[in-house]
Amino acid sequence: MTHIVAIGAGQAGAALVARLRSQGFDGQITLIGEEPVAPYQRPPLSKGYLLGEMGLDRLMLRSDEWYVENNITLRLGQPVESINTDSRTIWFSDNESLHYNELVLTTGSIPRRLPAAVGGDLAGVYTVRTLADVDAMRAEFQAGKRLLIVGGGYIGLEAAAVAAKLGVDVTLVEMSRRILSRVAAAETSDYFRNLHMSQGVMILEGVGLETLLGEGRVSGAKLSSGKEIPVDFVIAGVGILPTTRLAEVAGIEIDNGIKTDAQGRCSADHVWAAGDCASFPMGEGRMRLESVGNAIDQAELVADNLLGAGKDYVPAPWFWSDQYDTKLQIAGLSTGYDHIVTRGPAGDAVSFWYYQGDKLIAVDAMNDSRAYMVGKRLIESGKTADAAKVSDLSVELKSLLK
Amino acid sequence: MAKITYVEHSGREHVVEVRNGMTVMEGARDNGIPGIEADCGGACACSTCHVYVDAAWVDKLPKKDAMEEDMLDFAWSPDPVRSRLTCQIKVSDALDGLRVQMPEKQI
Ligand SMILES: Cc1cc2nc3c(=O)[nH]c(=O)nc-3n(C[C@H](O)[C@H](O)[C@H](O)COP(=O)(O)OP(=O)(O)OC[C@H]3O[C@@H](n4cnc5c(N)ncnc54)[C@H](O)[C@@H]3O)c2cc1C
Ligand code: FES
């Protein structure tokens, strides 16, 4: 009987095994996870779960019974230590091994940490990736406590919003000229800067962390501006790295992530990859995406290809972020844009449309699902939208689809 | 607690009890009912948790907000009256007996 093994029981791993069964695969499936919990959703970790609005039971992607009913062997809390792609065997830490016919790497990514040299290993310094990370920092979120967030990406900003809502005194430092500089236009940065400032969050741009201060536990921070501030706890939101080590040691090719072909195959036979850890060919280069939508789509594609579909991956990127009462929805990828067209504001809705020449490539929509959905449809079907119409609020957005 | 009937596009029915405070989407997910994909996990960002609510129930449910309305407008084959996003409907005793029908596909 064919045995498909997936290493990494997260968003992609869960989507992979579900798709295999829904497409009728009746061989053996094993899903292995390092974390002690069944696959869960990460997005709420910096949103509703951190705020305490959403319990653990609502975080799970599938019920425990579902794995049993679908005859999927879950091995949790068991990191895979090595892979031999010749004998098609994987090893666990206790030297136990498992044979596979096909192996899928869905190992995700890990947050960059602040180096020990700048106090990154002091107590009270956190990253936001796993349930365990968030459970560990929860107790720190008390009114009046002083939080320093290092890095102004979406996760840092979401954590700032939760903290501010709970009455925590938040300072966020972003080393580059503006928050979200890596992923969004200045218009979107301005929007979120204003939103956070209006909620009392102190945002310092063009300011880095020089070093954290404290004996054993963090008590302050020295900023690149020379200023020293008192701090009770710290969240580092300074980006993530694909989890590639296991693959690399096994001799599988890495290129900004585990390198796959257009169908999700790695350089070694019978090995595939999907999700945050995988880099796939895109035009002349390669691309790696860090989002739920990508994890699901790529994992489902690999499942289909394991069953012989022979399909190439066509990414249709989308993302969202919740901060205070603002819902940001993003369609497309903004990399390479040369100008922005603004629609609105109309009430609390505003959207920024990213163009490369005449071509629409992405939309950031704040409290405007219509702009998001129209943008998404246009981009996915390779169409563009006339800038004059986009910015004219009297033009009904849906008419752009015609 | 509410007893909810989920009807797959094929006509296959699933009757399950869903706890108050959960969403109708979570009721399907936690009971392994196919047809509701819920890619975004309830963030009202994917529109893959779309159903047609039984006509008798349309007026008994909490109203759609503007965001749900907009997302639904772009779901697969929406019905102006009966379509809802299940992640936006919170379960309460008042929903006991609710019946929802899945669309042929989500996107
Ligand atoms: C706080 C936070 C907020 C986010 N918000 C959003 C959002 O709003 N929208 C969005 O689209 N995306 C969001 N994301 C990103 C999204 O969650 C990820 O892109 C997605 O989880 C990727 O899925 P994955 O399966 O590739 O990786 P993961 O979900 O990270 O799963 C990988 C799993 O593999 C395990 N693993 C690694 N190595 C081994 C090994 N050797 N043996 C066994 N197991 C191993 C890991 O422990 C992990 O559990 C957010 C992420 C975080 C952390
Ligand atoms: S689950 Fe995504 S919109 Fe309902």
Image (cartoon, helix red, strand yellow):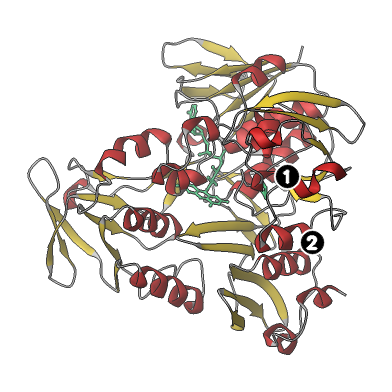
Farthest-out residue, left: A215
Q: Nearer the viewer, residue A69 or A145?
A: A145
What is the chain identity of the residue bearing mark 1? Answer: B
Q: Nearer the viewer, residue A275 or A398?
A: A398
Q: For the residue marked with disc 2, what is the amino acid? A: Asp
Q: Quadrant of residue A221?
A: bottom left
Residue at the spot 36% in from the left edge and 54% down from the top edge: A237
Numbered badge on residue B73: 2
**Left or right for A242, reference A30:** left
A175 is higher (above) or lower (below) than A51: below
In three-dimensional space, the C-alpha distance between marks 1 and 2, rounded to whole angstroms, equals 13 Å
Q: Quadrant of the C terminus of chain A?
A: bottom right
The image position of residue A332, as x and y in percent, is 66, 64
The answer to whether residue B31 is seen in the rendering is no
Q: Which residue position is annotated with label 1?
A: B49
Q: Quadrant of the N terminus of chain A?
A: top right
Residue at the spot 18% in from the left edge and 40% down from the top edge: A123
What is the chain identity of the residue bearing mark 2? Answer: B
Numbered badge on residue B77: none
Q: Quadrant of residue A207?
A: bottom left
Ligand 2 within 8 angstroms of badge 1 C-beta: yes
Using a 10 Å C-alpha cutoff, classify the residue at mark 2 as few (fewer than 14 neighbours), some (14 to 19) or many (20 or more): some
The image position of residue A390, as x and y in percent, is 71, 83
Residue at the spot 59% in from the left edge and 35% down from the top edge: B22
